[in-house]
Structures are given as structure tokens and as C-alpha cells.
Image (cartoon, helix red, strand yellow):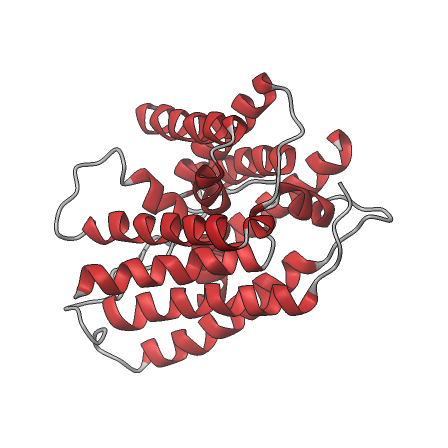
Amino acid sequence: MKAFTIVILGFIFGLGLIVSGMTNPDKVLNFLTFGNQWDGSLIIVMAVAMLIMMLTWQWVAKKEKPLFAEKFTLSDLKKIDSKLVIGSVLFGLGWGLSGICPGPGLVQLVSLKMEFWLFFAAVLGGMWLAKKV
Amino acid sequence: MVTEFSPVAAAIGGALIGIACALLLVLYGKIAGISGVVKSIFTKTNSGSRWKIYFIIGLFLAGITVQVFAPSLLEGELHLPPWLIIVAGLLVGAGTTLANGCTSGHGVCGMSRFSTRSWVSTCTFMAVAIITANLVG
């Protein structure tokens, strides 16, 4: 049951990425790049998703545990360290170049275009490298 | 390529993303961070991380369903030479691993929790991405 439910949640998330156009790198790049082609859709996607999550966090604050699990698995990291900042800079460089972040990168694999497979293989390579360091 | 501002589709898509993140948290106490989900491919799955595999399956099924019934929604291509695609992928992979999150984990789930780390991370990668896209694009 849990497995099935989570597959459905992944499905909804993926559908959200596709419906909002975020699986199209051009749409993301047109948000990141200023000019006549500017497309503000991304900010609406973020704002609506964040609003729903803000309300959800308020619910979470009042609860001891989730409905179907023993505890909330949350990051308790607080420190702003160089790893966080350097990682974010590197991610920003890659995202700004390609217009693809991990979610859309994963979903676009189903289009079976060579370029997205190449991109995703490199993402895995980058993750592997970063874990080695 | 020119894309059209699509506020309604963006709002619907954002709502779907938000609902999926919210339910994962409310039902199972987990954060829908896709870079973390992808990283699970490397690590031995245990009972605490098996959900990530199911989540990936769901993402793929969404893609496959759209590819079958409305392939035009999945349009998109990378206008980069192969070596730059590799560089960009490596940067995304290494960066999200070091930062412990990406647009979903830090951006959607973390900022809405008012996590300082997520705000620092998201503002940083957004700013760097904007500068990069304007310089390269």
C-alpha cells in the first residue's frame, strides 16, 4: 500500500513538472534570462508549490508524527558552511547552462533523447565525484 | 526558443508539485527532494530509503503517460554541444550533492519551512543561474 501510494505521489509530482512546462529547458532558460523572451512561469510554479508547503509545515508543527510513519525524517542541519555555498554555486552554474535540474532531468529520460541521457549520466557522475571528495 | 508565459498551467503544475510534497510529508514524514531521491541510486536501499525508488517509478510513469497521450507537453531540447551537456550535468550532480538539495528540496520544501540553509542555497543557485544564463544565452 505504501509503495503504491508513493508511486502515485511521484506520478503527481512528475505530472506537475510536465504540466507547468518545467521539463522544457527553454522555458526555464527564458525565466533565467532577461529580455523580450522573458517567461515568468517558473516563479508561479514555485510560489504555488511553496504556498501549499507553507500551510503543510504549519500542520506538521502541531503533530508528533506523520499519519502513516513513526517520525518525520527531516534535516536538522543548521550551519551555513562552505559546502552548502559552493554546492549551490556549482548547481547554479549547471542549471543556468542547461535549464535542467534533477527532477525534469529524470522525467525527460522517457523522451529517449540522447542529450537528456547524456545529461543525466553526467549528473550521476557529478554526484559520485562529490561523494568521493 | 521562445516560450509563452503560461500562468494557469504554471499554477496547476505548481499545485500538483506542492500537493505531492505535502502528502509525502503528511503521510510518511519525508521530504520530496529529487536530488536526494536520485542519489539513492548509489546507496544501498534500506527500509528507510526504499520509498525513493517508488517515487522515481512514479516520476517515470508520469513521463511515460504524457509521452503516450500528449507527447507535445514533453517537448524540449538542450541547445548545447555534447561536452557542455556533460559539464552542466556534472555541475548539477556535484553541486546538489554538496549543497544537499536542489530546486525541490531546498527551493520548494526547505524555503517554505523557513530553513536558513535552504534560503541561502536557493538564493545562491538562483543568482548564479541567472548570471550564467545571461552570460551564455
What residue do we see at 58% from left, 19% from top?
Answer: B82
Please identify the quarter of the rendering in which residue B40 is found: top left
Quick one: which residue is furthest to the right in this view?
Answer: A36
Quadrant of the rendering where the C terminus of chain A is positioned? top left
Residue B107 at x, y percent in the picture: 51, 56
Please identify the quarter of the rendering in which residue A96 is found: top right
Depth check, front residue: B21 or B67: B67
Tally of numbered discs:
0
Residue A61 at x, y percent in the picture: 33, 77
Q: Quick check: B38 left or right of A36?
A: left
What residue do we see at 50% from left, 26% from top?
Answer: A114
Quick one: which residue is furthest to the front in this view?
Answer: B69
What residue do we see at 44% from left, 40% from top?
Answer: A110
Residue A96 shows up from this direction: yes
What residue do we see at 76% from left, 32% from top?
Answer: B135
B8 vs B95: above or below:
below
Residue B101 at x, y percent in the picture: 42, 47
B103 vs A130: above or below:
below
Please identify the quarter of the rendering in which residue A125 is found: top left
B55 vs A129: above or below:
below
Quadrant of the rendering where the N terminus of chain A is positioned? bottom left
Residue B79 at x, y percent in the picture: 67, 29
Residue A79 shows up from this direction: no
